[in-house]
Amino acid sequence: MGLLGWIVVGALAGWIASMIVGKNHKMGLLANIVVGVIGAFIGGFIVNLIGGDGITGFNLWSILVATGGAVVLLTLINMVRK
């Protein structure tokens, strides 16, 4: 997956995760992309630990994995800030 693919998956995953966690009104496009890309790495790591395939390209599975990782990231950030 190329750079543009990572940006699109990151933006979608970060946006969905920010809505799930309730931080959508505080995050902009760049923050969503960063959270989504970092979330993709976290989600891919977690899925690989349990024996699945992580990020496999630009598809629904990759967006779900990245969203799950982004939710974990935002939850951890919220726990540290409180």
Image (cartoon, grey):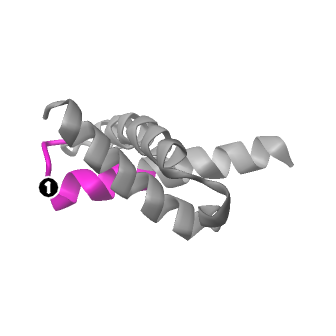
The spot of residue 30 in percent (x, y) is 49, 42
Is residue 12 depicted above or below 48 in this figure?
A: below
Measured from the top left, where is residue 36 in percent x and y? Answer: 42, 45
Position of 73 with respect to 50 (left or right) is: right
SS at mark 1 in the image: loop
Going 36% across and 41% down the picture, which residue do you hit? 40
Name the residue at the top extreme: 3
Question: Where on the picture, by quarter, is residue 61?
Answer: bottom left
Q: In terms of depth relative to the viewer, which is nearer, 18 or 64?
A: 18
Relative vertical location of residue 6 with respect to residue 27 in this rendering, above or below:
above
Residue 38 image-quadrant placement: top left
Q: Amino acid at mark 1?
A: Asn
Q: Quadrant of residue 27?
A: bottom right
Q: Nearer the viewer, residue 55 or 48?
A: 55
> How far across and down, in percent of the image, does residue 81 sit?
82, 43
Task: Specify start and end residues of the magenta stretch as a single range.
Answer: 54-68
**Quadrant (top left/top right/bottom left/bottom right) for the N terminus:** top left
Q: Which residue is mark 1?
A: 59
Q: Which one is nearer the viewer's eye here, 29 or 18?
A: 29
What residue is shown at x 43% (from left), y 37% (from top)? 42
Q: Residue at x 35, y 57 (%)?
A: 12
Please state if 59 lies on the left or on the right of 9 as rendered: left
Q: Farthest right residue? A: 82
Secondary structure predominantly adopted by residues drawn in magenta? helix
Q: Residue 61: within the magenta?
A: yes
Which residue shows up at 78% across the image and 41% down it? 80
Q: Magenta span has 44? A: no
Q: How many marks?
A: 1
Local packing at callout 1 (Cα closer than 10 Å; few below 14, some 14-19, many 20+) is: few
